[in-house]
Image (tube, helix red, strand yellow):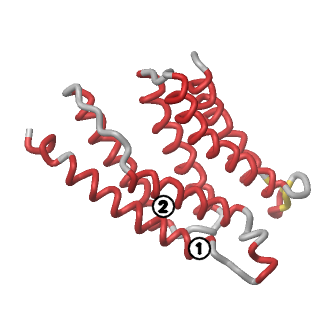
Amino acid sequence: MNLPNQLTMARIILIPIFMALLLIQFPKGQPIFPYQDFVAAMIFILAAATDGLDGYIARKRGQVTVLGKFMDPLADKLLVSAALIALVDLGHVPAWICWIILAREFAVTGLRAIASADGTVIAASKLGKIKTVSQVVAISLILLHDWPLSLFNLYLGQPLLYVALFFTIVSGVDYLVKSKKLLKK
């Protein structure tokens, strides 16, 4: 269990803490403590930041492992899925956007599993990385109610969610095209 894998596991462990802070309230929708949603957002951002960090450390130190290759994308999908589902529950994200994003994640995970069974690794593409970053930025802004941009009457969380949706669809199509050989088997 090297440092990159520990960071990945920490990301997974932070998910229920993030969810609890975001969703648990007193009756009548009152937060348990002041700035509870801000703390939840900070935990989401911290967890998301470990994604780039674990990969960087693994490559830099030559500590790329089979466990890391499996757990890292799974941790990303769990974090983004948990945040989107919670934001749908809170009324901040339309359910259809969440469904499209989750459907893409399941499809790509399935394609990777099929490829893995044949000994093929489908590496993350640049589009996939742009998709992940755009999702994290949009979700972070929505969680933060667009703070600090809202101080300047800039509300970018929702528009960036549509940008993330665009990259989600485009990167999903890209994975389908690249894995066309696998689908013919």
Q: Which residue is mark 2?
A: 98
Q: Residue at x 43, y 54 (%)?
A: 102
Q: Position of residue 32 (x, y in %)?
A: 87, 52
- Horizontal placement of 22 versus 122: left or right? right
SS at circle 1:
helix
Taking the view exactly as shown, the residue that stands out farthest to the left is 184
In the drawing, what numbered circle is on residue 56?
none
Image quarter of residue 8 = top right
Q: Amino acid at mark 2?
A: Cys
Q: Position of residue 174 (x, y in %)?
A: 27, 56
Q: Which residue is mark 1?
A: 158
- Position of residue 97 relative to residue 82, above or below, is below
Q: Residues within 10 Å of mark 1 (few under 14, many from 20)?
A: some
The mark total stands at 2
Viewer-proximal residue, 100 or 119?
119
- Position of residue 163 relative to residue 126, above or below, is below
- Position of residue 91 relative to residue 11, above or below, is below
Viewer-proximal residue, 1 or 84?
1
- Of marks 2 and 1, which one's residue comes earlier in the chain? 2
Viewer-proximal residue, 37 or 156?
156
Q: Position of residue 31 (x, y in %)?
A: 85, 57
Q: Amino acid at mark 1?
A: Gln
Q: Indicate the quadrant containing the C terminus: top left, top right, bottom left or bottom right.
A: top left
Q: CA distance from mark 2 to mark 1?
A: 13 Å
- Horizontal placement of 70 versus 2: left or right? left
Image quarter of residue 111 = top left
SS at circle 2:
helix
Q: Residue at x 39, y 49 (%)?
A: 105
Q: Residue at x 77, y 69 (%)?
A: 147
